Image (cartoon, helix red, strand yellow):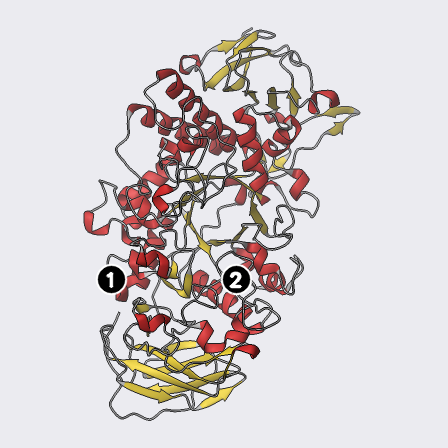
């Protein structure tokens, strides 16, 4: 990137163009374009450095076309630091909050030159913020990508790994220390080789758009570690750049290229439902001072914000320019930064054109017809905090969803606290009840048991209650309903029986997740049992509490090896990653099933069995020779036959095998309660001792003659 140069002391300002929005360098100067329908004047403020206390030059943008203020300044080069002062009516009852004392960040800023500085002027309604406002930097966007075609990993072959750029790399001993906690650290061979060896095909990065820390967190010495407080939708957050703010864009691009070279896609967790400006008491940093009435959902009195997010405001996706901002941002990250998809935080809020969630709204329509965005991975967090916000199963085609019903059902099953065994079977089989009705396939279900928001896997089996005291909110924050089980003691213990049970429960949950139909998502560190001390909402904890600890105990190494084996099985065996839902069918008058559900006596489950709320034990039998699918090259996809035995009860259950096929015996692939059972052969009609709280995977083997 070029060294920053200021504009000449005297330079003409030409009318320029209203498109594209933002600051666009053409080799000779920069075109500046800013949307504001209700402004009366817009001043471009040029700064000599990020430390400058005041702008060196103000330039009035000379033209307004189609609600966009614009001007072209010859001689301005990449590296120029800038912001805006926007003039207009201050009329809160009409939703207008213009205040030219505030220097505002360009909503289309592609590089951040200065983070916000929480001085009194920021929160003072009349204070001048030239010395403390976040500022943008002009960049040259003509990055010459090396050969980096999109991977386009098919959904049914995808395994998602949710991670935090800093948390994953900060303590990794094989990443060079200057690169730890950064994009460059995630691009390092140590990081990419680990992910590849684990069996990951896509990383889902917690928010990396430029975000700011809330004032109350800064005051208490904390930060918004997760990053769900976005202010810049086009700029990678410079706090994760080893090369500093001026190198963040190039470093992010190099990270994507390195991950792609390792066969790993990059999915961004994006927060278009609200901004960092908060409620009506929040700071004026960008959108609020540029055009409050256009960018935000306002209540009837126009002085307060509709809040479907719990964060103080909601972006007004019903306004064409706000919707354009979102779509331009998404395309920027695909075309200029080469990311492979997006996970939309609180996605229901984006579907509220008026009040109700509308899956036929403009947001979905525009994405579906867009030649760029319709081709990438789209994942919804299918809920928000507004009325009827829980929309699991209701998103349209092209979308996959975080399946919250899968998470809750699987957790309840393995606690042994009841729940419907029928629902558990439905979730294992891909949740056709949620996704088949509108033509979607099993990959619409993004299955997860843990995520950043909530307990880690180890904590899920170690705590009955949240322990969020470190957050400074008297343990009031975080979810109170976790469907967890501490296995007999709250928190850490030296009791060997409890620790053995916890290890087994982690294996049960991981095996259930990875062998279920749909797309599995792992939370970073769960593969080796990382702990978070019972904190289920560590959004403000930027410390070793949330950074992955890469010093593994023997039991953690065993769990890591177990996870790798599971992912290898999934990769090798198509029965665990079907592209279509299970269907019974008739061939030559004989009913052929591609899925069987068996009771411990070896017989098929009946309607009565499915509705028995006390059932804790069943078998999912997957005939590999009944897969009627073809690969991309027309080859027929086949695989081995497997049976998965589940027992969430405390007591051992004798399970009879092989009644349907007298020519097959079984081989134990693994038993979560008995590591020594691997490779054991089980004869036809033999009874397998299924231990309490265990899962067993069996592979059908030809019987000896």
Along the polypeptide, which appears first: circle 1 or circle 2?
1
The residue carrying pointer 2 sits among few (fewer than 14), some (14 to 19) or many (20 or more) residues within 10 Å by Cα, namely few
In the rendered image, which quarter is residue 611 located in?
top right
**Secondary structure under badge 1?**
loop
Foreground of the two, 99 or 403: 99
Can the viewer see residue 212?
Answer: no
Foreground disc of the pair 1, 2: 1
Image coordinates for residue 569, horizontal then vertical, percent: 47, 29
Judged left or right of residue 244, residue 513 is: right
* Measured Cα–Cα span from mark 1 to mark 2: 30 Å
As drawn, the residue found furthest toward the right would be 589
Image coordinates for residue 497, horizontal then vertical, percent: 39, 16
The residue carrying pointer 1 sits among few (fewer than 14), some (14 to 19) or many (20 or more) residues within 10 Å by Cα, namely few
Residue drawn 33% across the image and 27% down it:
556
Above or below for 340 versus 361: above
Foreground of the two, 88 or 403: 88
- Tell me the residue that label 1 is attached to: 244
- Tell me the residue that label 2 is attached to: 372
Foreground of the two, 5 or 489: 489
């Amino acid at each position: 990137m070029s060294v920053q140069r200021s504009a000449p002391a005297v330079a003409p300002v030409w009318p320029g163009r209203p498109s594209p929005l933002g600051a666009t360098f053409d080799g000779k100067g920069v075109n500046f374009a800013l949307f504001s329908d209700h402004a009366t004047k817009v001043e471009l403020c040029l700064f000599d450095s990020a430390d400058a206390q005041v702008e060196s030059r103000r330039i009035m943008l000379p033209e307004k076309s189609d609600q966009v203020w614009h001007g072209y300044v010859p001689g301005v080069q990449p590296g120029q630091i800038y912001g805006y002062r926007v003039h207009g009516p201050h009329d809160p009852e009409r939703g207008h909050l213009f205040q030219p004392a505030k220097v505002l960040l360009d909503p289309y800023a592609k590089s951040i030159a200065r983070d916000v500085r929480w001085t009194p002027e920021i929160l003072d309604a009349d204070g001048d913020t030239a010395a403390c406002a976040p500022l943008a930097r002009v960049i040259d966007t003509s990055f010459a990508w090396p050969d980096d075609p999109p991977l386009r990993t098919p959904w049914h072959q995808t395994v998602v790994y949710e991670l935090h750029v800093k948390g994953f790399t900060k303590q990794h001993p094989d990443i060079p220390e200057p690169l730890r906690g950064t994009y460059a650290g995630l691009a390092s061979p140590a990081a990419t080789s680990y992910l590849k060896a684990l069996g990951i095909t896509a990383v889902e990065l917690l928010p990396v758009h430029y975000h700011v820390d809330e004032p109350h967190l800064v005051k208490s010495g904390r930060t918004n570690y997760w990053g769900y407080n976005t202010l810049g939708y086009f700029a990678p957050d410079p706090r994760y750049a080893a090369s500093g703010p001026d190198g963040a864009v190039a470093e992010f691009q190099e990270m994507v290229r390195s991950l792609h070279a390792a066969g790993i896609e990059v999915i961004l967790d994006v927060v278009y439902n609200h901004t960092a400006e908060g409620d009506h008491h929040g700071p004026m940093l960008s959108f609020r001072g540029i055009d409050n009435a256009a960018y935000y959902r306002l209540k009837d009195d126009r002085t307060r914000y509709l809040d479907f997010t719990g964060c103080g405001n909601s972006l007004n996706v019903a306004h064409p320019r706000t919707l354009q901002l979102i779509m331009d941002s998404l395309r920027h990250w695909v075309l200029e930064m080469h990311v492979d998809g997006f996970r939309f935080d609180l996605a229901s809020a984006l579907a509220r054109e008026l009040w109700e969630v509308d899956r036929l709204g403009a947001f979905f329509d525009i994405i579906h017809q867009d030649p760029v965005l319709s081709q990438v991975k789209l994942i919804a967090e299918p809920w928000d905090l507004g009325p009827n916000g829980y929309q699991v199963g209701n998103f349209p085609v092209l979308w996959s969803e975080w399946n919250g019903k899968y998470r809750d059902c699987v957790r309840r099953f393995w606690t042994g606290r009841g729940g419907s065994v029928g629902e558990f079977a439905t979730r294992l089989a891909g949740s056709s009840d949620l996704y088949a009705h509108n033509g979607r396939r099993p990959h619409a279900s993004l299955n997860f048991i843990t995520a950043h928001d909530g307990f880690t896997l180890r904590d899920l089996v170690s705590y009955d209650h949240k322990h969020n005291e470190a957050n400074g909110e008297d343990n009031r924050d975080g979810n109170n309903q976790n469907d967890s089980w501490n296995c007999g003691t709250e928190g850490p213990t030296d009791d060997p029986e409890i620790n053995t049970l916890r290890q087994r429960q982690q294996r049960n949950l991981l095996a259930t997740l990875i062998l279920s139909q749909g797309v599995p998502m792992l939370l970073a560190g769960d593969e080796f049992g990382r702990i978070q001390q019972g904190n289920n909402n560590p959004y403000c904890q930027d410390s070793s509490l949330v950074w992955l600890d890469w010093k593994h105990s023997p039991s953690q190494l065993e769990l890591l090896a177990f996870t790798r084996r599971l992912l290898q099985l999934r990769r090798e065996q198509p029965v665990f990653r079907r592209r279509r839902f299970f269907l019974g069918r008739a061939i030559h008058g004989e009913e052929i099933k591609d899925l069987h559900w068996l009771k411990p006596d070896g017989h098929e489950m009946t309607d009565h069995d499915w509705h028995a709320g006390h059932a804790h034990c069943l078998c999912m039998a997957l005939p590999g020779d009944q897969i009627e699918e073809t690969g991309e090259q027309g080859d027929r996809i086949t695989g081995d036959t497997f049976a998965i035995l589940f027992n969430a009860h405390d007591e051992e259950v004798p399970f009879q095998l092989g009644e349907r096929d007298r020519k097959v015996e079984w081989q134990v692939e693994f038993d979560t309660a008995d590591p020594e059972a691997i490779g054991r052969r089980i004869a036809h009609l033999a009874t397998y001792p299924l231990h309490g709280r265990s899962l067993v995977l069996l592979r059908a083997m030809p019987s000896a003659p």
